[in-house]
Image: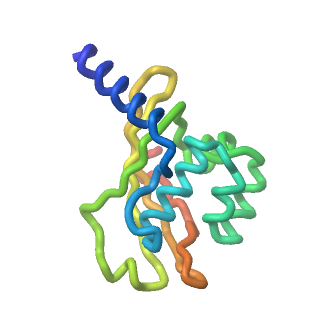
Amino acid sequence: MKFSSLIIVLITFLLTACGNEEAGRGDKDTPGFAATMYFDALYNKKDMKVALDLATPRLARIMRSYGTPSQFTRNLVNMQFDHVTIELDMTNKSLREQYGKKAKVNLIFTGQLHGNQVDDMRSVQMVKRKGNWYVDKINPDPYAR
């Protein structure tokens, strides 16, 4: 069991380290793509500026108050990773959400923290302004307490 987990982790690491393409795939005009790029900027790139550009002004103000991506993700998002893979949860996808002004996107996070595998899920509220999708709110984990 440990050997197969090690092989999967090594293959994942090699595949993510070899390419220089962006983390998000798919249509760039969808709320799922924007949400994936937002969390990729916070967790993998650790670039607050990129994440701020993908957030609404209200969320951006809250993010700035924490100073760094790691402080924001540790305290407000309540998830920590050394490295993470972010996927869209396609089980609840609705085409109507993509063409409206608001959408709820569920994301699945699979990553490593201190050598241990961590799996988590978050839901975010997205809004469309001037043709672009922005993260408006990160819904709290209902099982956190």
Q: Is residue 3 left or right of residue 74?
A: left
Identify which residue is drawn at 32% across, 19% down: 6
Q: Residue furthest top?
A: 3
Residue 8 vertical position relative to residue 126 in the rendered view, above or below:
above
Residue 29, percent across and down? 46, 73
Residue 6 vertical position relative to residue 108 in the rendered view, above or below:
above
Identify which residue is drawn at 40% across, 29% down: 14
Q: How is the image coloured?
A: rainbow
Residue 58, percent across and down? 69, 70
- Quarter of the image for residue 64 reads bottom right
Q: Quadrant of the N terminus?
A: top left
Query: How many numbered markers are drawn?
Result: 0
Residue 91, percent across and down? 24, 62
Identify which residue is drawn at 41% across, 65% down: 105
Q: Is residue 58 left or right of residue 8?
A: right
Q: Nearer the viewer, residue 122 or 144?
A: 122
Identify which residue is drawn at 64% across, 57% down: 51
